[in-house]
Amino acid sequence: MLRFVLRRLGSSVLLLFFVLTATFFLIHLAPGEPLRLFDNPRMSEDKRDELRQLYGLDRPVAEQYLDWLAAVLRGDWGYSLSFERPTFDILMERLPNTALLVLAAVTIEHVLGVLLGLLAAMRAGTFIDRQIRIVSLLLFSVPIFCLALLAIELLAVRWAIFPINQMRSDGADQWPPLAQLIDLLHHLALPSLVLGIARCGAVVRFVRNGLLEVLRQDYIRTAYAKGLTTGRVLCVHALRNSLIPLVQRFGVALPILLSGSLIVEVLFSWPGLGQTSVQAIQQRDYPMVLATTALSGCMVVVGNLLADLLQAWLDPRVRDAI
Amino acid sequence: MPSDPLTRVSPLTRVGLLLLALLMAVSLAAPWIAPYDPLEQIDAAAGKHQPPLTVMAAVQLEHGRWRLADRVERGPDGVIIERLGQRQSLAASEVLNLDEDGVRDRRIFLLGTDKFGRDVLSRLLHASRVSLMIGILSVAMAIAIGVAVGALAALGGSLLDGLLMRLVDGILTLPWIFLLMTLTALFAVDVWMLIVFLGMTAWPPICRLVRAELLSLRERDFVLAARGLGLGEVRIFFRHMLPHALTPLVVAATLRIGTLILIEASLSFLGFGVQSPQPSWGNMIADGQGVLLTAWWVAAFPSALLVFVVVAVNLVGDGLRDRLDPTLQQMTRE
Amino acid sequence: MRHESLGTTRQSRWLPHERVGVLGAALIFVASSWLAGCGQSAPPQAEVSSIVVAYPFDIQGVNELTTPSTPIMNGMLYFAWFLQLVEEQPDYEDGPPSFEPRLAETYEFSPDRLQLTFRLRDDAVWSDGVPVTADDVRWTWQAHTSPEIGWSFAEAKARITDVEVVDAHTVVFHFSEVYAAQLQEANLGIILPKHAWSELPFDQWRQNNDWFREHMVVNGPYELESWEPQQRFVLRRNPRYFDPELPKTERIVFQITPDTNSRLALLRSGQAHMIEVIDPSDAAMIENEPALQLLSHIPRSFFFVAWNISRPLFASKEVRQALTLGIDRQEIIDSLHFGYSSPAHSPFPSNLWAHNAELEPWPYDPGRAKEILDGLGWVDSDGDGIRDKGGVPFSFELVTNSESQVRVDVLPMIQQQLKRIGVEVRTRSMEFNALLGPLTDHDFDAVVQALALDTSLNTSYFFHSDAIDSGYNWGSYSNPEVDELIEATIAQTDPLQAKPLYDRLQEMLHEDVPMTFLYESRRLSAVSKRLHDVDPNAISGFFHIRRWYLEDED
């Protein structure tokens, strides 16, 4: 078990290292430089050189790379050029926000997906089944930004049921904890619903097909033969087994989830990693781009690992195999 | 293995396939069937955000300039046009396309116009061409890489297999949208580079599929028999194994096209993909984002078409899969 | 800045739509539905009027020396948190701007104009109670010019040789030469708190923005109550501000809202009271809202196409004139600016005292443009619709930065217009960050850009031949007579004598066409009618933010 974890971690970290190295050279070779943020007509070339020197950007790229690598190994992710603050601090401020959004979305996605999938499987072949399948196919095919735009325009602007953007109301930090919690949920509702609903189509299909597959197995027939009710057979025996691949799917789907959350964050001004990274790329904030890439990579790697472990815990066959 | 998939798929799939084919044909023919030039801002001020089914008179002036007018009347010494709510008279010498009642030309905006008075229908047709091309070609590239690497992994020995599969695992766990954004932001990307970038990110699932298929095929009787006959490995691969792996590949590729079209649209929507003024579904939707309530047609038509195409692609993919190989269900989805 | 626990003065009213929202959220989050009732009965607190501004960008720090200069940063630093010595006024229509007292009550030049004495007010204190003194002024100058800090505007202080502290409230600036902008350049920058910020050595200033925020003391009308990055920052009345009458409003909340539609939605629903800059395309909508009004001003900037004169294609001024005649500025204005701009012919906007009103902008005259190009031998000899000469087609790339939608939209319009006179334009937009390199390296054909004039109307950064190597003379324009004129305008301290020089300079630029000036566009702000004394102007959208106040809702 430990060997498995170490091996997976090892290969992931190695790959992440290669990606970061490639990113490092890519952004340094690309046109544009970060200190242009400070540029103005009164600035002479000497002044620009002076600034480059202050930030160590005048040295060869290879040398900068080695410095960066050494710093990263010490756990120092450098200073953001546009924020003039340690990138690590900024990311740690944003990470919980993204995590909250993603967690809420994943919950909605799976609760809704499993319920609808279960319903469709129980009523396989009926009207309800067909409707659920059509809806899930549609959700699967609608780009998240279309859904988000529609939700903002209708629910936040026209009917003003939800706040337009951001995470908390002004002055919320002075409210009692309960009101603060509600305020947060109120702001969280729309982005997480959009993200969760947009993604639940795939889960519905997955659960439905998985259940139908399991229902054909011998042990289910045995269960029926023992006189158990359909509901009980489905929920206790079949659902459990069809959920195992769902856990595995979660690991693979995590990068897609992150990219979805990126779009949602940008559209809802959610102060998370996605928004930060879009900004960092636009401003050529080298350390920030590298740190966000690394962090999102780590999130995916850890998510995958957790999914694998969870799957092993759920499924004895996998547990023995690793 | 079935030889003619079309004869055995469900009617819904057939309809989906037909519509897709139709759309592809229309998109390919976009330069010839689009009513107007997708970039032409014929009269940006007067033609701005006209709703669908608008018909306007087009008054031709000197030096290739045009004016769009709601109404044109013949006056005593020229024409009187009603433009932007104002009446304005133009001398006969100024107007090049005069006829008895007014002017000869008019513009019909079937799906309305965008903020520059560009024809949404023409843009939509050209956008479909770009978006479909990106989807199809990047999948083609993903298949080429996926098959090559998958075959190497399956047939190249366990050491190579282990290495390549670690690589595939790794690539699958990367936050690609971040990297794609970085790449497209840093280098001025054109459509071809976008295809290459997308293709490079999309091959690992196909590679896994091919490898699994080949590993199981390797142990099958007919392959063992071929090997027993002393046929070369390369020949066995191309003549005997690859054709058998084709079915799941076609299904996976079809479904993949839908995913990639969505990714391209997202990138363009965020401003990192196809660059304006060249239209793509994503950047057309982004253009209409600000005017969803006042000029819904700018974003609505590309959105609808995008959803329609992805649904059709999924229907076709699912239909093919259900017919061809029910056991594939778990493997090709996501 | 610090979270003082003045619970009684916080805004904590639940707006009606928020209440609905709580219910909506609760319905969906079933688990928390029972909480909804509690939320509505949030404890009643005394209300305080807060102005809410919906703004697209966040601030990036509180120290202007190490933070990129942006309109929001300048607005906050100069008008909310800190004091300048004197305050430049937007009254530059008939002559150079006047200056109102801020930290300095008076200023006076010595007879030889090499010394400038400021007399500071004695009732100005930092928000921790420490008085603001001449020491702060001198130390600020040291920080401005420190190479360890590397302030990007340090060049402005190059001709100040010393800042001498005479007594606690008197300070003298010594200059190496006499020139027109002495007062502007001495006054550039806010006065920094020496007692608080000198604890951090200059060589550690960069990369320590958090430190300044944690050690922030202010002497302006507002302090920074709180800052949630990418969400909002809140200004709160500074009780130690020297004028007890000001500011008029207790709190100003800046809601960071990157999306244009969201900003408009906040304003229209009454959740925000001001948007500093709106697109001309949204102006009509604002004018139709009875509760909102539109304010506009002409910014001190100019929009242009700069031709790269070091490229053979644009070397002759006749070619540049022909291209200018071929660009239909009115069409661009009609379709992109909705009548909120007018054609321009000079870098100085029409409301500026130095503007030359005698000059007529180049008209749109494609016929004459064609004749000029024909006369120069640029004819379409191969019948492909593009003029050529010696086998070289008249074709070039027009670039701009992608952040500005209006500029991006201008490209295809110019492309289509020049196509009508047989000139092929290829268009490309890239990020400003990536564009600046090619511009300062003169590695481009033509560029659509805008530049802002500084208060001293110093045009040497754009048109002087010295600015080819260092500065923003991207197109490598060089004309000895223009160089001389620019130097003369910089040196001339009497505006009456400077005016003819400026007029002549504009004639020369009009004739030489190093740039085709496109239009002068009004900047539009949308403001709730309940919000009074807002005065966005060319100096800042947040000018005199200390006077803003909100009328009570009926």
Image (cartoon, rainbow, N blue to C red):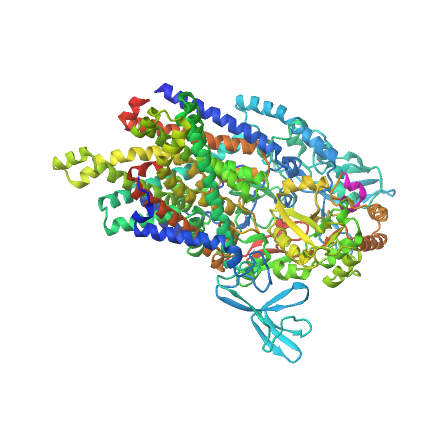
Instruction: Name which quarter of the figure residue C332 lies in.
Output: bottom right
Q: In which quarter of the image is the N terminus of chain C?
A: top right
Residue, x 43% and y 48% (percent of image)? Answer: A148
Return the residue nearer the eye: C78 or A308. A308
Residue A192 coordinates in the image, percent (x, y) = 40, 43
Residue, x 48% and y 43% (percent of image)? Answer: B137
Instruction: Name which quarter of the figure residue C461 lies in.
Output: top right
Residue A171 coordinates in the image, percent (x, y) = 47, 44
**Residue reaching furthest top?**
A3
Return the residue nearer the eye: C431 or A222. A222
Q: How many labels does the image show?
A: 0
**Residue reaching furthest front?**
B229
Q: Is residue B249 left or right of residue C457?
A: left
Residue C460 coordinates in the image, percent (x, y) = 78, 45
Residue B263 appears in view = yes
The relative height of residue A83 versus residue B46 in the rendered view (above or below) is above
Q: Is residue C466 magenta?
A: yes
Residue A273 appears in view = no
Q: In this view, does A58 lie to the left or right of A273?
A: right
Secondary structure that dominates the magenta span: helix
Q: In this view, does A132 lie to the left or right of C380?
A: left
Q: Is residue B263 magenta?
A: no
Return the residue nearer the eye: B145 or C304. B145
**Residue reaching furthest right?**
C112
The relative height of residue B79 versus residue C401 in the rendered view (above or below) is below
Residue C144 coordinates in the image, percent (x, y) = 72, 35
Q: What stretch is highlighted in magenta?
A: C461-469
The relative height of residue A15 versus residue C378 in the rendered view (above or below) is above
